[in-house]
Image (spheres, rainbow, N blue to C red):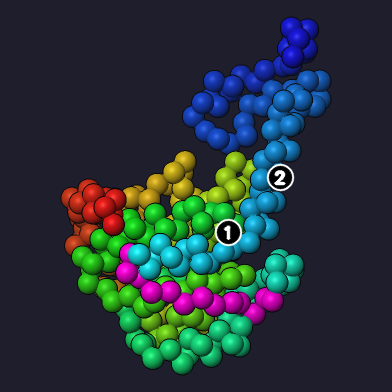
């Protein structure tokens, strides 16, 4: 870009703040338009977000490393038969296909404490990048809490509520859904985690707790695992979740078996799984 072209750009007074965030702030302007460089960056970010939505979920790529950790998996599908239908019919992504429903309902091992579901959601890229390290960070806490774990369900074409359907089939006391979040223009690979006590298909969105933006550039795995473990501990003590259960994991008066002291131990153990 020539010096003359640079002189045409009106810089935003917040420009110095861009070093602290990936958000699209202080972009400047040329006349009434964005500078060409920022317009090209926007086009790239939009393309990356679209790619994240349509990238196929290859559940085998998660099943293998989970098996190496000693964790069994079950692969299921939602009632949405393909990606196009999934995007147009969110309701179908919230429930299991008849075949998958029968598969889980007939599973011999039921009534465990916790079911983990990994679903592609709107960004399988997020699931492929973040789900495994998130689970590795979580495992030491689950051992400390003494929670029995059902086989991990890997769900294709899934929405958050599919976890309730799966949890009801396996009669789990609580379900945690790890799912790819709707891609943003600066975060196409962000993972969300939803925890529900007493999962069943009649649960409301207000009856879940959510931890979002899990990725190295956002909420990192150790912090996210600690928050989730704290919520699980409280859910099993109070037998509830959602708006009745506030995340007060930073309140020292409410520390239980999951504590800041154990957080450092959990990180060290998790990194050597």
Q: Which mark is residue 124?
A: 1
Q: Quadrant of residue 84?
A: bottom right
Count of marks, rendered view: 2
* Residue 78 lies in the magenta stretch: yes
Residue 43 image position (x, y, % from top left): 73, 38
* Residue shown at 37% from the left, 87% from the top: 110
84 left or right of 112?
right
* Residue shown at 28% from the left, 57% from the top: 273
Which residue is the extreme one toward the top? Answer: 3
SS of the residue at dot 2? helix
Mark toward the start of the polypeptide (2 vs 1): 2
Q: Tag 2: Cα neighbours inside 10 Å, few (<14), some, or many (≥20)?
A: few
Residue marked by disc 2: 47
Q: Tag 1: Cα neighbours inside 10 Å, few (<14), some, or many (≥20)?
A: many
SS of the residue at dot 1? helix
Residue 15 image position (x, y, % from top left): 59, 21
Q: Quadrant of residue 253?
A: bottom left
Magenta residues, as a range?
A: 69-81
79 left or right of 36?
left
């Amino acid at each position: 870009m020539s010096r003359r072209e640079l002189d045409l750009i009106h810089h935003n007074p917040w420009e110095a703040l861009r070093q602290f965030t990936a958000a699209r702030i202080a972009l400047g302007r040329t006349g009434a338009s964005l500078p060409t460089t920022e317009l090209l960056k926007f086009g790239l970010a939009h393309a990356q977000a679209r790619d994240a939505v349509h990238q196929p979920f290859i559940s085998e790529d998660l099943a293998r490393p989970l098996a190496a950790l000693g964790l069994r998996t079950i692969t299921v599908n939602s009632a949405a038969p393909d990606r196009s239908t999934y995007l147009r019919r969110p309701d179908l992504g919230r429930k299991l296909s008849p075949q998958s429903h029968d598969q889980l309902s007939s599973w011999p091992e039921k009534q465990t404490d916790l079911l983990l579901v990994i679903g592609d959601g709107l960004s399988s890229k997020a699931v492929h990048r973040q789900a495994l390290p998130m689970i590795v960070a979580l495992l030491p806490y689950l051992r400390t809490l003494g929670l029995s774990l059902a086989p991990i369900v890997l769900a294709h074409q899934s929405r958050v509520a599919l976890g309730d359907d799966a949890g009801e089939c396996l009669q789990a006391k609580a379900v945690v859904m790890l799912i790819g979040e709707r891609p943003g223009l600066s975060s196409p690979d962000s993972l969300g985690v939803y925890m529900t006590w007493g999962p069943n298909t009649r649960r409301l969105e207000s009856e879940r707790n959510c931890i979002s933006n899990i990725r190295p550039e956002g909420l990192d795995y150790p912090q996210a695992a600690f928050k989730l473990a704290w919520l699980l501990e409280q859910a099993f003590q109070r037998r509830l979740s959602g708006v009745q259960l506030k995340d007060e994991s930073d309140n020292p008066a409410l520390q239980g078996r999951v504590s800041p002291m154990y957080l450092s131990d959990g990180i060290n153990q998790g990194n050597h799984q």
